[in-house]
Amino acid sequence: LFLHFGTMNGHAILYTGVTVAFWSTLLIVGICYTIFDLGFRFDVAWFLTETSPFMWANLGIGLAISLSVVGAAWGIYITGSSIIGGGVKAPRIKTKNLVSIIFCEAVAIYGIIMAIVISNMAEVSYSMFGAGLTVGFSNLFCGICVGIVGSGAALADAQNASLFVKILIVEIFGSAIGLFGVIVAILQTSKVKMGD
Amino acid sequence: MLGYKMSQIPGSALSFAVLFTLLFSGRCSHQVPLVMWSSEGHALPRHAPPLAGHTVSGPQLLSYLTAALSGAPHNVLLFLQDKLSMDDFTVFGGVFGNKQDSAFPNLESALQSSTFPLVLPALSWPDSSALPGMLQEQLGTAPLYLDPETLAQLRLNSSGVALLVFRLPYSTEADMMSPRAVLRGNDEVVGQVLNIMKAQGVPYTAVYTAVRPSRVIAEGSLDGESVGRSLLQASSNEPYPPVEFKRGESTCILLWAENLTVSHFREQWRRHELGPQTFGSSATVSLTGSSCNRTHSRLVLNYENVLGFRSFRLIFSMSQRYYSVSARNWFTMDQVELEYDGQRALFNGSRNIYAPTEYSYRCESVTSFRDALLAAHSLTDNATQWRLSFEEFQIQGFNVTGTQFSYASDCASFFTPGIWMGLVTSLLMLLVFTYGLHMIMQLRTMDRFDDPKGPAIAVPQNE
């Protein structure tokens, strides 16, 4: 590994360095716990029960919106660059393919709605974290998916106008998975009031 | 207490330190002032006042008295206050330009109107309490303990010998009056007595002093920190051993705490500290009712007359068993009970008070109300009327070897929950940041069609 430093670029050196530091820290801490017979101190249950649920709740809210926005942004980036590139040669695709951008944007809107719904929950509980994670990750991948499909749609449309509508159907399926995430997150948050 | 080991100090430094402390130890402010004056027209003989800072000892006092009484009237009024220090004059004497606040106006006017009053600012304490005896010897008459009313009824002989002692208090019962008020009252008494004597036309010699000092400032020996530990230094906080419950010959349960405080709410919170009754040389606690076996330990501390309850018991119940996930034995403090006059209050401690069976549990603060480790079972339990607070609490109910605690598993971990939360959140942010940075650094501008030698791009004006 060290011999390859010369051929690596800056990223690789940084990442290998961080990885080595991380794993060696874990190794040394683990060795210390073992040597001093303090293994009982390593208590995940203690960590989960003692840390404040407020941290988890706010992490959930933050992740809900931020991961959704990352997904939307990524999708728009992918689709947008394809639309712009394809639009150079076939300007007619510009207006029609904005639909793909809107599908990506919808994902961000799901995220913000869920973030507001979760933050308005009266009872702070761990399900806020769960709901935020659910909607965040599902929107993230939904956004990427819609983006890639939309990019394909733009480029295909530039070649052959009849292809656009067919590919739009694929995009609709891709967008549905973001909606699934929102539904499950709503179920998670609503369970707090109904259940106990 | 200093952590120096005696073996680490070289011999010469050690002997120097011992000498130093021997010379300077015992320099404490155990001094009482004495003021002596005579009635107008009858002066005390001239005398050399004591040197400033000099503490007058017994024999010197005797010589002063002998000299004074040789020429003074032999009707001696001794105003003997319970306690007096020079600081009382400083604090209450109106010496900072506030004469109107002085608590000694009569004393001051008496001193001013007499010639050559004898003022001994520092009379060593044990000798000051011998003053009545000294005066008795000098005058050859027994002392008469009086108050102003009784004095008014006496007829004194101008040329006679009398020793009249007026005892003055320093503090009232239950400290209801401030020292200033008490001293003012005493000064009034002095004024009354002097007026009575003046009215009767009897010359007198008056002495105002006290039996013991009111402020005892123990100046420690010259600092031993720089020259080594002082051999004469006694530690104020004697460490005491833990409470031991023995089953047969071997110790079964150990308990130590700096203090065990219980508070009960009945119209208001009332506290009681059980520490002194439980630990140390003044312990009166009994452990009857305690039991221990391999899986359950119960330590019962029996007290009497706590917070108005005739019988009071503090019970710690612990149990231990094998937990398969961590594959070891743990013990938990299941309950902390208070039994008082037939009633019970239960606190649950198993959630937070636990440790591996081989070790003891130690926590700086085990309370039921502030960062509570002990919880009441329900809102209606008697436990809601009680507050427990144990400081520097250490307990071991199982696997006790010898009479000492095993390794103490502390309730405070290396990383507190707050630190962990901060670390987790920061790590998450760092991950996000790293990923974003990685993405941005991967962006490449298109350079496939770059032609540095070709013409620059022409952007048409119209669409």
Image (cartoon, coloured by chain):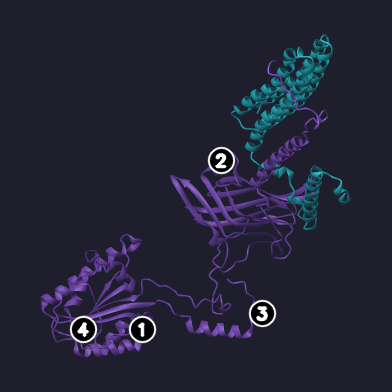
Chain colours: A cyan, B purple
Which chain letter matches label 4?
Answer: B
Q: Which residue is mark 3?
A: B7
B318 horizontally vs B91: left or right: right
Residue B341 location, x and y as percent?
A: 52, 49
Which chain letter matches label 3?
Answer: B
Q: How many marks?
A: 4
Q: Amino acid at mark 2?
A: Asp
Q: Amino acid at mark 3?
A: Ser
Which chain letter matches label 1?
Answer: B
Q: Secondary structure at mark 2?
A: loop
Q: Secondary structure at mark 4?
A: loop
Q: Residue at x 68, y 25 (%)?
A: A111
Q: Vertically, is B206 above or below B69?
A: above
Position of the C terminus of chain A by quadrant: top right
Q: Residues within 10 Å of mark 2 (few under 14, many from 20)?
A: some
B93 horizontally vs A36: left or right: left
Q: Which residue is mark 2?
A: B381
Q: Which residue is mark 1?
A: B54
Gap between marks 2 and 1 measured at Cα = 66 Å
Gap between marks 1 and 3 measured at Cα = 39 Å
Q: Residue at x 14, y 87 (%)?
A: B159
Q: Are marks 3 and 4 in contact (CB under 8 Å)?
A: no
Q: Amino acid at mark 4?
A: Phe
Along the line of sight, the residue nearer the viewer: B380 or B196: B196
Gap between marks 4 and 1 measured at Cα = 19 Å
